[in-house]
Image (cartoon, rainbow, N blue to C red):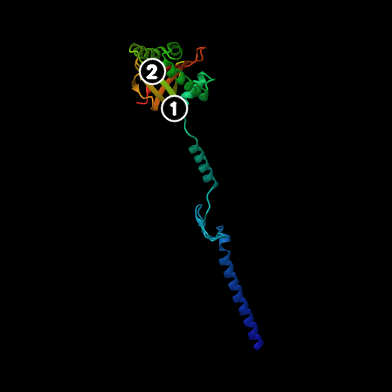
């Protein structure tokens, strides 16, 4: 009898074990059978990863965002053309030999020659450097000075700065305006040599704004002074 009961216990335990195995398989294999993967928390594209090696929060940025930032920086670095740049390009299209640096050198030289010629009353030189309107204004001032028996002493100490401030084309005529800052000593004396205007011991800073022009279709490469004005 004892052996019979033991045999029945073995069968009973085997049936219980088989039942438990079937239950476990039905639970563990449920996601696989349904075709759906187990649900896990997926990190967002910009979320912090708390499992980094250094224990710090690490944010992963997409490569596309980096490229867009690079493009934005390049756009910021590219400065837009100024009206002066546009005008210079227009002149270069009409006269490819136009050089900004050489022009400024020539303008400074012309400035020195013109103010000296005006002081000395050299109308021949002035007529070659000025257009008719500006020449007539200079000539009138010279004749007025001569009528009063006055002389003008001009000493150009130095040119402090010379820069282009405007450039444009008017039909075929190129126009360039420069601002010239210079230090000068100007003294006007009467027939007896007495000072009637200015101070021989004082250096004045003078700002002149002059416009030079040249017809790009003409064979004459020389520029002429076509307008003058002061800073005021």
The residue under label 1 is 83
Identify the image quadrant of the C terminus. Answer: top left
- Between the C-alphas of marks 1 and 2, the distance is 39 Å
Task: Residue at 58% x, 69% y: name it.
Answer: 24
Number of numbered callouts drawn: 2
In the orientation shown, which residue stands out farthest toward the front?
192
Residue 65 placed where, x, y %? 51, 45
Left or right of residue 9, residue 173 in this image: left
Q: Secondary structure at mark 2?
A: strand
Q: Quadrant location of residue 137?
A: top left
Which tag, 1 or 2, sits closer to the chain's start? 1
Left or right of residue 187, residue 112 in this image: right
Q: Secondary structure at mark 1?
A: helix
Q: Nearer the viewer, residue 151 or 218?
A: 151
Task: Residue at 34% x, 21% y: name it.
Answer: 197
Task: Residue at 40% x, 26% y: name it.
Answer: 207
Instruction: Tell me if residue 28 comes above or below residue 166 in the rendering.
Output: below
Q: Quadrant location of residue 200?
A: top left
Residue 97 placed where, x, y %? 54, 20
The residue under label 2 is 152
In the orientation shown, which residue stands out farthest toward the bottom?
1
Identify the image quadrant of the N terminus. Answer: bottom right
Q: Nearer the viewer, residue 14 or 185?
A: 185
Asked if one can make out residue 163 in the rendered structure from this viewpoint, the answer is no
Q: Nearer the viewer, residue 68 or 102?
A: 102
In the orientation shown, which residue stands out farthest toward the right?
3
Residue 190 placed where, x, y %? 34, 16
Q: Nearer the viewer, residue 88 or 204?
A: 204
Instruction: Tell me if residue 148 comes above or below residue 104 in the rendering.
Output: above
């Amino acid at each position: 009898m004892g052996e019979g009961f033991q045999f029945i216990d073995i069968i009973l335990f085997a049936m219980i074990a088989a039942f438990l195995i079937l239950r476990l398989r039905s639970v563990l294999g449920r996601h696989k059978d349904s075709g759906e993967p187990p649900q896990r928390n997926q990190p967002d594209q910009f979320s912090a990863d708390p499992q980094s090696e250094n224990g710090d929060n690490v944010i992963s940025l997409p490569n596309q965002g980096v490229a867009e930032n690079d493009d934005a920086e390049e756009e910021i670095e590219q400065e837009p053309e100024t009206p002066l740049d546009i005008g210079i390009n227009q002149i270069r299209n009409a006269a490819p030999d136009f050089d900004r640096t050489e022009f400024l050198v020539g303008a400074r030289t012309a400035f020195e020659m013109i103010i000296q010629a005006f002081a000395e009353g050299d109308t021949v030189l002035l007529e070659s450097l000025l257009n008719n309107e500006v020449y007539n204004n200079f000539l009138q001032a010279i004749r007025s000075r001569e009528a009063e028996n006055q002389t003008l002493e001009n000493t150009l100490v130095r040119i402090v700065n010379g820069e282009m401030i405007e450039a444009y084309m008017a039909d075929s005529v190129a126009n360039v305006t420069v601002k010239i800052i210079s230090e000068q000593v100007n003294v006007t004396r009467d027939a007896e040599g007495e000072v009637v205007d200015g101070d021989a011991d004082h250096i004045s800073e003078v700002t002149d704004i002059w416009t030079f022009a040249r017809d790009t279709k003409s064979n004459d490469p020389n520029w002429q002074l076509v307008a003058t004005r002061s800073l005021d």
